[in-house]
Amino acid sequence: MQKSLDVKIKRIFADQNCRDFILADAKDADMAFGLAAPGKNAGETSYRTLDQYREQIRLIIEQGLVDIVLMSASTSEILTVEEHRFDNSPITPAIRANDTTDIWLAGAEGVYGQEPSRCFRTATLDDTRLRNDISCRRNGTDLGLYSITFNNIVEYDREALTAYKEFRQEAELKGFRHFLEVFSPNIAGLNCPKDIPAFVNNHIVRTLAGVTSKERPVFLKIPYYGPAAMEALARYDSRLIVGILGGSEGTAFDAFQMLADAKKYGARVALYGRKINHSEHQLTFIKYLRLVADDDIYPQEAVYAYHSELTKLRIKPHRTLDDDLCRSEFKSNY
């Protein structure tokens, strides 16, 4: 089965004016949030189980509207290899290839996010790469997310870049592709840049300037800092595909409008995690993300249509329609 990700990347490189847009669902929350990762159903006090979380992923794969599903290596092993869920799907499976300390968010007692991000990688590429011999394939994907956080502290940033260099070299040898996630600095203080969007943009292009094509990321995943920062990065290098991360939970209008704005100013990818996972009905929410991404509906119209379908499904929305048409999330990506 031809993968929509590969088709779209080829078209984007062939025609910078094409309107193709890559949509990804981040279902790797178990690498960050522990027992809370699967989220809650509306009106329930306990979290979903990991089995329920994976069942939702199966439904999303069957729906076929996203281009990538990002998972933990353990979930990918079950769905990709044992169950062959992606064999006849246009969706590309991907795994989180590293888990730096700033995403160690399991439980209320953790304080790791209050310290500068440190490098760590649980998954190993021998377990995650797509092998030519299907009989010995482990979790059957050749694509992974690698994340890095710059904090403007030379000791930690040098460590992060060294670890990224080692990962790239290993990935190139083993035929493993990656997309690069760059977070905002995770700590405040004297070293925190005054202009975070410019700081992140400049570090991205400086970092990749020394990386040749075989080791370069397939695309970027960064916070959406607004039109000026997105446009500056997207126009800098025509061989660099820029994408956004969804950030924390917000209104439906937050999700749809941020995607439309990012695309308007040069983004080609959106990877949404909590916005999808915390929605009232994930398949319907994804349906309208796809329509917005493909220029088939305006964000405000998508909110109206989404609520209409929730009514038909007899699902109570988290917010009133008026509240869901408001924007509340934009500032939280800084």
Image (cartoon, helix red, strand yellow):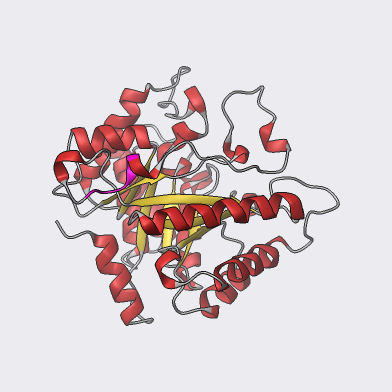
* Residue at screen point 43% across, 38% down: 123
Indicate the quadrant containing the N terminus: top left, top right, bottom left or bottom right. bottom left
| Image position, residue 234 (x, y; %) | 52, 74
Q: Nearer the viewer, residue 178 or 172?
A: 172
Residue 253 in view of the camera:
no
Seen as rendered, the residue at the extreme right is 190
Span highlighted in magenta in the image: 127-131
Indicate the quadrant containing the C terminus: top left, top right, bottom left or bottom right. bottom right
Q: Is 246 displayed left or right of 330 in the figure?
A: left
Q: Is 95 displayed left or right of 116 in the figure?
A: left
Q: Nearer the viewer, residue 319 or 217?
A: 217
- On whether residue 6 falls in the magenta region, the answer is no
Seen as rendered, the residue at the extreme top is 46
| Image position, residue 19 (x, y; %) | 34, 74
* Residue at screen point 37% across, 21% down: 49
Residue 324 in view of the camera:
yes
| Image position, residue 271 (x, y; %) | 43, 53
* Residue at screen point 60% across, 54% down: 162
| Image position, residue 262 (x, y; %) | 50, 65
Q: Main secondary structure of the magenta part?
A: loop
Count up the numbered dots. 0
* Residue at screen point 26% across, 32% down: 78
Q: Is 123 displayed left or right of 225 in the figure?
A: left
Q: Is residue 78 above or below residue 282?
A: above
Q: Nearer the viewer, residue 177 or 231?
A: 177
Q: Is residue 19 above or below residue 175?
A: below
Q: Is residue 1 above or below residue 44?
A: below
